[in-house]
Image: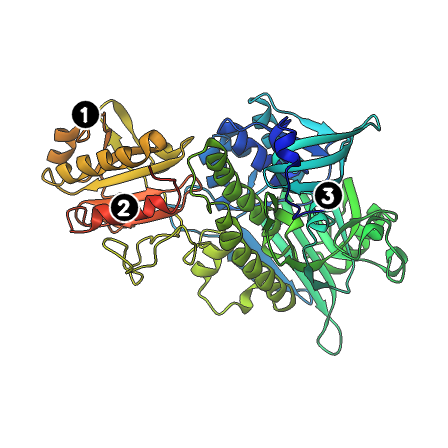
Amino acid sequence: MEAGQKGGFWRETPVVDTDVLIVGAGPVGLTAAAELRRQSVACRVIDRLPARLPYAKAVGVQPRTLEIWDRMGMVRAALEVAVPMRGQVMYVDGVEQGRFELRLPPEVPYVFAALPQYETERIIEEHLARFGTGIERGTELVGFTQYEDGVVSRIVTASGAQQELRSRFLVGCDGAHSTVRKGLGLSFEGGAFPEEYMLADVQVDWSLPQGYGVRATHHDGDGRVDDLLVCIPLPGDRRYRMSMLVPPELSTNGEEPARDARDSVAHGLEGGRAPRVEHIQAVLDRLSPQPTTASVMRWSSVFRISHRLVDRYSVGRVFVAGDAAHIHPPTGAQGMNTGIQDAYNLAWKLALTLEGGAHPRLLDSYDAERRPVGEEVVGRTVKHATEGIRAAPDDMTTVMLREAQLLVAYPSSPLVAAAGAGPGSGDSGSPAPQPGERAPDCPGLTAGVAATPLRLYDLLRDRGHVLVLYADSAAALSACRETAATVHRLIGGKVTAFVVSRHQAAAETVSGQTDADGRHLPVFRDGAGEFERLYDAEGPTAFLIRPDGYLGARLSPLTAPGTASALSEALGRVFQLG
């Protein structure tokens, strides 16, 4: 596979089958496809499996993922079937050592949740189908060649037919054994844990508190853990996804697992020996906090864990995301959620590039932003797997925010101006969100015809870039109106603008008014002062919020000399300005 080949073949063969070919129909690939289709980008999704696997593999859904699904307009379906994760109870050598609560600040709109992976895939697949796009099942990528203007992929369909498929871009979401990653020649450095584990989806009859996970360990005479039970609640009556060490009779150590025969990466489910309910019961008899009986086993498997990270997330027009780019222990349910954020980060950049309005180097920011995140997640989950989550030196609030993926940020991104680098660039010492950080939600916004207060995320849903203008007085409205007009002059209608104001007179004055060029400029009143508090807004301020919910710029005060040029510079990092 000539991943970096350039030449004139593409120009001589201008036929394009699709804008983006996505390989892999797990949660990561489906997220990329759904966001691309939401933004009217043509894409195709292929997967070598003939059907969705009915396995409860990745089950933890982080609050940040729910925020992404909210922005995409598909969170409701998840809320209808997911169950809340309230915390975890820990037992060591048969004695309860306490519990920690999964608590987050009240302005965070979603809590930790649990949902079987097949349900996650169903929800995103059904959302994708609304755009007329389905999954091409039983179709496998066997090779690809990259050219200056596109990629030619060689695929084998479910009927066994060999085809060439031409696309502008190729995205590999094809897991730990990724064909796309290998075709790019990317390194995948790391290692593997020696332990083997059992996974099982079972029902038990204990009376432990609902919504809480269970972690029970036993130590040998030298103080080493020699027995382990981890239970994550699933939808259903006392139903759990359980993991535990493999007994000797099920061990595959010393053998070549069938699934890993394709490469040296020992990660994920392994075929062959499937644990039976008596294997699960034996562990429960040793480690369960209460006498209990396992029943209704829906699925079980043996699995291995590795930790690896690619050296690059992209080469030219080909990208990798999710397990194709990073694998690590399941501690804290970080893997699938990190992959979903990979896909969402990449999708809006691909869409803007294909639309023709992007900065020429916009796609380079995918690796710049997401690879440091992957590196941090791999390192943290390995540490937590070996030392426990409480080994973190931070306070538990910070730990919970990090586990919820609400602290993911891009302070060194080429799309973000460094704090203090120009007028209105923000103060890195402020507790308020800075450029590159997540834009928090806030409640209590009202409008003239809305009898019920709105959340900020209600106003961001199903939109691209949004310019939120804060006016603290009626006099500040002129600066907000001029700023909105300036943005439109620079990039047309690629950014949606509205005003938030705490000041009653300002809100009443701006209602029904326009920007400086006569375009309608909506206003929402910050009646409870939550936006002012959470964003530390003081004076007329502009917040440029990206499609993935991160701040691209924070400009204040709008009346300061040089702010207009700083706004142009911030937009120019993303858009191709005329």
Depth check: 50 or 21 in front? 21
The first of marks 3 and 2 along the sequence is 3
Depth check: 70 or 224 in front? 70
Q: Amino acid at mark 2?
A: Leu
* Disc assigned to residue 518: 1
Mark 1 neighbour class, 10 Å CA radius: few under 14, some 14 to 19, many 20 or more: few
Mark-to-mark CA distance, 1 and 2: 20 Å
Q: Position of residue 390 (x, y in %)?
A: 54, 66
Tell me which residue sits at (68%, 38%) in the image: 23
Q: Position of residue 274 (x, y in %)?
A: 85, 47
Q: Amino acid at mark 3?
A: Asp
Between disc 3 and disc 2, the foreground one is 2
Quadrant in the rendering for residue 419 = bottom left
Q: Quadrant of the C terminus?
A: top left
Q: Position of residue 391 (x, y in %)?
A: 55, 69
Tell me which residue sits at (61%, 51%) in the image: 335
CB under 8 Å between callouts 1 and 3? no
Say which residue label 2 marks: 567
Mark-to-mark CA distance, 1 and 3: 60 Å
* Disc assigned to residue 201: 3
Query: 373 left or right of 184?
Result: left
CB under 8 Å between callouts 1 and 2? no
Depth check: 118 or 17 in front? 17
Tell me which residue sits at (61%, 46%) in the image: 321
